[in-house]
Image: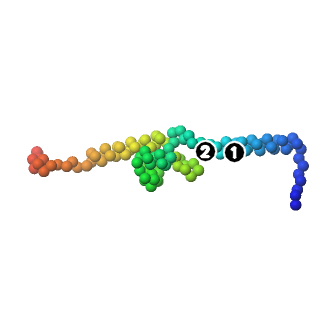
């Protein structure tokens, strides 16, 4: 069964104008996600390449809070500054580990210890 509804032309024009405005806003919002310019943001592949790690290791860095991230539409993004901080942390840990390693002493040095 078909129903016919009569409305005034001014009410119809107002409704159409509002609907067109709604469609325009939705289209603009939809186009924001397709913008390929991420600015200072990196995706998973970029970060893996920069840090020379696997995607699984990257997941671990996210899980344990070492690397901050943002997720938009099931895609993960990282700020360049956060990735740089991870690089600095790794370098500092390597330096600290190098200082903790026992130095190898040759046999000749071991026999001629000075007390």
Which image quadrant is residue 34 in?
Answer: top right
Q: Residue furthest left?
A: 112
Is the residue marked by circle 2 packed among few (<14), some (14-19), or many (20+) residues within 10 Å? few
Is residue 60 among what the camera can see?
no
> Mark 2 falls on what kind of element?
loop
Q: Is 85 on the left or on the right of 33, as rendered?
A: left
Is residue 74 among what the camera can see?
yes
> Mark 1 falls on what kind of element?
helix
Q: Is 60 on the left or on the right of 106, as rendered?
A: right
- Name the residue: 74% across, 41% down: 21
Q: Position of residue 91 (x, y in %)?
A: 35, 43
Mark 2 vs mark 1: which is more N-terminal? 1
Count the labels in the image. 2
Q: Tell me the distance, in whole angstroms, between the alpha carbons under discs 2 and 1.
A: 13 Å
- Name the residue: 88% across, 61% down: 1
Image colouring:
rainbow
Q: Residue furthest bottom?
A: 1
Q: Is 102 on the left or on the right of 54, as rendered?
A: left
Tag 2 residue: 34
Quarter of the picture containing the C terminus is top left
- Name the residue: 43% across, 45% down: 50
- Name the residue: 62% across, 43% down: 32
Q: Position of residue 100 (x, y in %)?
A: 27, 48
Please tell me the numbered disc located at residue 94: none
Q: Are marks 2 and 1 in contact (CB under 8 Å)?
A: no
Q: Position of residue 95 (x, y in %)?
A: 31, 44
Which tag is nearer the camera, tag 2 or tag 1?
A: 2
Comparing 70 with 33, the one in front is 33
Q: Position of residue 36 (x, y in %)?
A: 57, 42
Tag 1 residue: 26
Is the residue marked by circle 1 packed among few (<14), some (14-19), or many (20+) residues within 10 Å? few
């Amino acid at each position: 069964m078909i129903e016919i509804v009569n409305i005034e032309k001014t009410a119809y024009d107002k409704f159409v104008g509002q609907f067109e405005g709604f469609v325009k806003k939705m289209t603009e919002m939809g186009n924001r996600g397709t913008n390929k310019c991420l600015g200072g943001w990196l995706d998973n592949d970029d970060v893996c390449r920069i840090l020379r790690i696997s995607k699984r290791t990257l997941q671990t860095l996210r899980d344990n809070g070492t690397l901050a991230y943002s997720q938009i539409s099931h895609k993960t993004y990282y700020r360049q500054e956060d990735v740089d901080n991870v690089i600095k942390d790794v370098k500092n840990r390597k330096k600290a580990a190098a200082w903790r390693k026992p130095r190898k002493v040759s046999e000749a040095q071991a026999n001629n210890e000075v007390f």
